[in-house]
Amino acid sequence: MGNKPISFRDKDGNFVSAADVWNPKKLEELFTRLNPNRKLRFERERLAEEEAAKHPELNEETEQV
């Protein structure tokens, strides 16, 4: 048996690599559809990072604890 790359057939019947079919944008859409809370978590993490960048003195205090 051996490892075989997952592939698909296009409309003409030619094999297409899964890497060509699942680009980053399509993967993001799929993951968001499968887990809607994922987008909310990413937004919370992004806001937390922005807030931490605004107040670097708070980060230093928490790192020392």
Image (cartoon, rainbow, N blue to C red):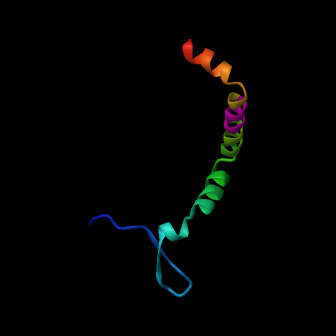
Q: Position of residue 36 (x, y in %)?
A: 69, 47
- Compared to residue 30, the image places residue 57 above or below, namely above
Which residue is painted at 67% across and 19% down in the image? 58
Looking at this rendering, what residue extends furthest in the bottom direction?
12
Residue 10 colored magenta?
no
Q: Position of residue 18 (x, y in %)?
A: 48, 68
Q: Position of residue 17 (x, y in %)?
A: 46, 72
Quarter of the figure with the N terminus: bottom left
- Compared to residue 56, the image places residue 21 above or below, namely below
Which residue is painted at 67% across and 34% down in the image? 49
Quarter of the figure with the C terminus: top right
Q: Is residue 2 left or right of residue 34?
A: left
Q: Is residue 14 left or right of residue 63?
A: left
Picture quadrant of residue 29: bottom right
Picture quadrant of residue 7: bottom left
Front in this rendered view, residue 28 or 8? 28
Q: Position of residue 60 (x, y in %)?
A: 61, 18
Front in this rendered view, residue 16 or 51? 51
Looking at this rendering, what residue extends furthest in the left direction?
1
- Compared to residue 42, the image places residue 48 above or below, namely above
Residue 49 colored magenta?
yes
Front in this rendered view, residue 15 or 20? 20
Total count of labels = 0
Which residue is painted at 62% across and 57% down in the image? 30
- Compared to residue 9, the image places residue 45 above or below, namely above
Front in this rendered view, residue 47 or 22? 47
Magenta segment: 45-51
| Magenta stretch prevailing secondary structure | helix
Which residue is painted at 68% across and 31% down in the image? 53
